[in-house]
Image (tube, rainbow, N blue to C red):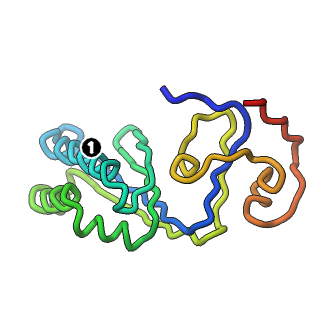
Amino acid sequence: MAKVVPGRYTAETEDSFVVFMIGMRINHLWAVHRWLPVFMAMPGMIRELYMNRDLGFKDGHMHFSWRRVCLVQYWDSFEKLEHYARNGQQHLKAWRDFNRKIGTDGSVGIFHETYIIPKGNHEAVYNNMPVFGLAKATSHVPATGRKETASRRLGRDNDPAVPTPPNPVQ
């Protein structure tokens, strides 16, 4: 289990980046033979990305809900993400298998959303959390001073609406 870091932190990066969400939805619950292979393709792709960081993958995390699995990923650039989508061994195999075996039969849904985040156009806060999300993909730094509020993290100016407790001494 990840270690909780007491206090308020934010994610810091001087670069633009991409947030990519990809996942699947089980549309026909009893069609296990249709959706299980789609689900089982995900670990291979994730393993391939973690083992080949030069592909541009920074980090990611998985979310589960009733009929859905979603992976939120952070990438260096859209170009690197697209290159992996078109050339990554595990992804190409999964893509071809899905189109051949599932196609448009409606049993399993897949989706992705891509967000290109220009430099300086993001903000995040993590309070009493393990190093997580964008902070794990970039730099995990105290959310103090110019990083204390969402507005300040976006380069604007305001005062906290609620007094911020000091971070514990690490």
Nearest the viewer among 94 and 54 is 54
**Three-letter amino acid code of the residue under disc 1:** Pro
Give the percent coordinates (x, y) of residue 51. Answer: 31, 49
| Residue at figure coordinates x 73%, y 45% from the top left | 142
Nearest the viewer among 86 and 109 is 86
Secondary structure under tag 1 reads helix
| Residue at figure coordinates x 84%, y 51% from the top left | 145
- Tell me the residue that label 1 is attached to: 43
Give the answer, above or below, for where 170 lies relative to 149: above
Nearest the viewer among 31 and 127 is 127
Give the percent coordinates (x, y) of residue 19. Answer: 48, 61
Compared across the picture, whether 5 is left or right of 1 comes to right
Residue at the top extreme, as displayed: 1
| Whether residue 109 is visible | yes
Residue at the left extreme, as displayed: 100
Snapshot quadrant of residue 8:
top right
Query: How many C-alpha atoms fall within 10 Å of the one at disc 1: few (<14), some, or many (≥20)?
Result: few
